[in-house]
Image: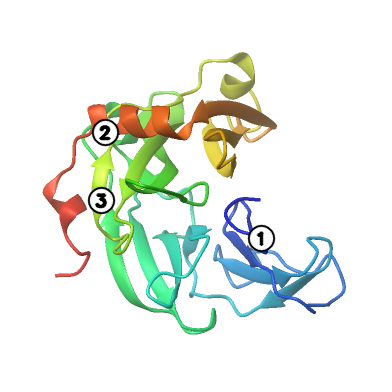
Amino acid sequence: MAGCAGWAYGRAGLAVYGEPGDREEPGKGGCQDFYGASIGMAKTADFKIFVRVENPFLPFNRNAVLFPRKIGGKFVLLSRPSDSGHTPFGDVFLSESPDLVYWGRHRHVMGKSSEWWESVKIGGGAAPIETSEGWLMFYHGVTGTCNGYVYSIGGVILDIDNPSVVRYRCKNFLLTPQEWYEERGFVPNVTFPCATIHDGATGRIAIYYGAADTYVGLAFTEADRIVSYIKENSVVREPDTEIGKR
């Protein structure tokens, strides 16, 4: 769980929103039954019983991330359009909705960079955290090697009112596979940010991340510390600062 009460975020393109009175048989849901990899969405009142709602987009799309509150009166969702395979490309896009059913006003947020750890593709991860500098988001970057893909965790700060605009983007990875449980598993060499818990009183952030698609890792930082690090090591390119449409 992250953000405000009633919201939760899951890996593999599942976005969850909670409303009082939502009821349905548990166990329904998923993201692979819509004729290909796509984003699923569900709502819940107690995080035990979930109600499946309409898929936001057509296949193929992944890495759904809901913002923890409305922006400009609209729900805001990040996603990464893809293909039917192990996608060798990928940029992050933003979409808005008045009702979690109809999505539009699509905007480009950011793409891969020349940094080695995110030179193939990028995608969302944990839900953004609201800070005084903007929306702090941990995302994943992918590089290619002779032994396959390597997934690392990066950090970015998006504009608080117009999150299709990147304010600061860290040129360095924040976490990359180094421990044995990150290097060896069902999919080797993966650190993939899945969710965060932010303690507003202390600023402490717990980052839950997938390790080699086999284990769940847990890393800790502090909001002020990580925001300062991202700002001090920021390289923002022209496409990052655009409003996301041309």
Q: Is residue 233 visible?
A: no
Q: Nearer the viewer, residue 117 or 144?
A: 117
Is 85 on the left-hand or right-hand side of 180? left
Q: Crowdedness of circle 1 by 10 Å Cα count: few (<14), some, many (20+)?
A: few
* SS label for mark 3: strand
> Amino acid under label 1?
Ala
Which residue is depicted at the point 53% across and 31% down?
190
Numbered circle sitting on residue 5 = 1
> What residue would you read off at disc 2?
231
**Eyeballing the image, is 145 above or below 124?**
above
| Residue holding disc 3 | 166
In this rendering, is residue 89 above or below 46?
above
CA–CA distance in space, label 2 to label 1: 29 Å
Residue 43: name its quadrant. Answer: bottom right
**Quarter-wise, where is residue 138 in the image?**
top left
Tell us which disc is closer to us: 3 or 2.
2
Left or right: residue 200 compared with residue 136: right
Q: Which residue appears farthest toward the right when viewing the image?
A: 25
- The three-letter code of the residue at mark 2 reads Lys
User: Relative to 171, is 42 on the left or the right?
Assistant: right
> Residue lying furthest front in this view?
201
Of the residues shown, which amino acid type is indicated by label 3? Val
Q: Which SS class for mark 1? A: loop
Identity of the residue drawn at 29% across and 68% down: 107
Sooner in the amino-acid sequence: mark 2 or mark 1: 1
- Mark 1 or 3 closer to N-term? 1
In this picture, residue 95 sits left or right of residue 15: left
Say which residue appears at 48% left-offset and 75% top-offset: 58
Asked if the residue at tag 3 contacts the one at tag 1, i.e. Cβ–Cβ closer than 8 Å, the answer is no
